[in-house]
Amino acid sequence: MTRMHGGADALGVPRFDFSSNSNACGPCPAALTLIQQADATVYPDANYTLLREELAAFHGVETWRVVLSSSASEFIFRITAMVAKQSALQGKVSVPTHGYGDYVHAAQAWGLDITSEHKEAQLVWACEPSSPLGGAHTHWPIKVKSAPQTVVLDCAYEPLRLSGQSSLTAAMKDSIWQLWTPNKALGLTGVRAAYAIAPINARKNVVALEQLCASWPVGAHGVALLTAWTEPSVQIWLDASLQTLKAWKARQIDLLQAAGWTCSPSESNFFCAGPLNQMNMTEIFLRLREQGIKLRDATSFGLPDSARISVQTPEAQDALMAALKELS
């Protein structure tokens, strides 16, 4: 099965990559240094004792609530497997109308049905800010604070939020799973590591997920990434980068609109856009890629004739504008 993602492809790493939502201000210097200093000659602690304690303290939760994962995608498949086992393969999964394809891929792998009705679903996926639109999740289960289902909030882009705020209170978040992937925010997407914060009443499910996990899901470099994530200096760098991204985003939208593109509103470091002149999007993607520029085809998100475009540096923006001018 061919999967569509942003970033490197068969042609290699794009010179100007608008297809990946990685922080264009990155990589974070302090995080990169810790990763480069990681000792890859020894196994990490199989229980990740110190790392889990640091992440728990960072979020202000009990240590048992921290579940490590080799990546967000790995966790998506693992928690789907847990729900499938618990429902004896008769469960249903609710996914956003426009969302990350792995939610559906994992459900299909376990033979679970996709439903738009939250009440029917044993597993409910949410993402906020959402991808590809970068906005609020609008279809929460009724009274999410006491929702009987397994509800997972994908927080991949929360650290890259440029405006708005979460639609959930702290109490509501305590009742759902929160999936965190710091590599995007730190501009280090090549380092695969993630973690989830379990709901306060989910100790049995934490045990179930650990039973489904292979040993050492996170390698030495992933441990270094997640450790760096909790460092005050790294968070200070991240906060400063958001101010830069806000300015770059405003510039990028102005340039695209001047070139005849319409840009959808978003609260994150990416947004969806498309030309007003009815140009063939497939041709646009191919011809831009030939020039070392990659946009993210939003068809797999359920948005044909649209591109998800991440905020990039002014140099990259100018290269995109020059290439689009040649296409017009």
Image (tube, rainbow, N blue to C red):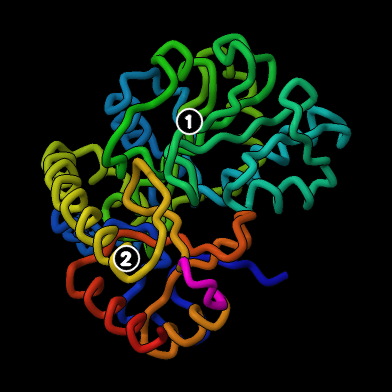
Q: Secondary structure at mark 1?
A: strand
Spot occupied by residue 266 in the image (x, y as percentages of width and height): 38, 44
Q: Is residue 141 above or below residue 182?
A: above
Tell me the kind of residue under disc 1.
Answer: Gln
Magenta segment includes 118: no
Q: Amino acid at mark 2?
A: Leu
Q: Residue at x 44, y 84 (%)?
A: 289
Residue wearing tag 2? 256
Task: Give the residue at mark 1.
Answer: 178
How many numbered marks appear? 2
Q: Is residue 73 left or right of residue 37?
A: right
**246 relative to 179, above or below:** below
Residue 37 relative to residue 74: left or right = left
User: Which quarter of the rendering shows the C terminus?
Assistant: bottom left
**Mark 2 or mark 1, which is nearer to you?**
2
Report the magenta residues as a range: 276-281
The tag on residue 37 is none
Q: Local crowd at mark 1 within 10 Å, few (<14), some, or many (≥20)?
A: many
Query: Where the N terminus falls, by quadrant?
Result: bottom right
Relative to residue 207, is residue 181 depicted above or below? below
Residue at coordinates 47% horizontally, 24% vertically from top-left? 65
Question: Would residue 141 be found to the left or right of residue 180 on screen?
Answer: right
Q: Nearer the viewer, residue 84 or 103?
A: 103
Q: Position of residue 56 (x, y in %)?
A: 34, 26
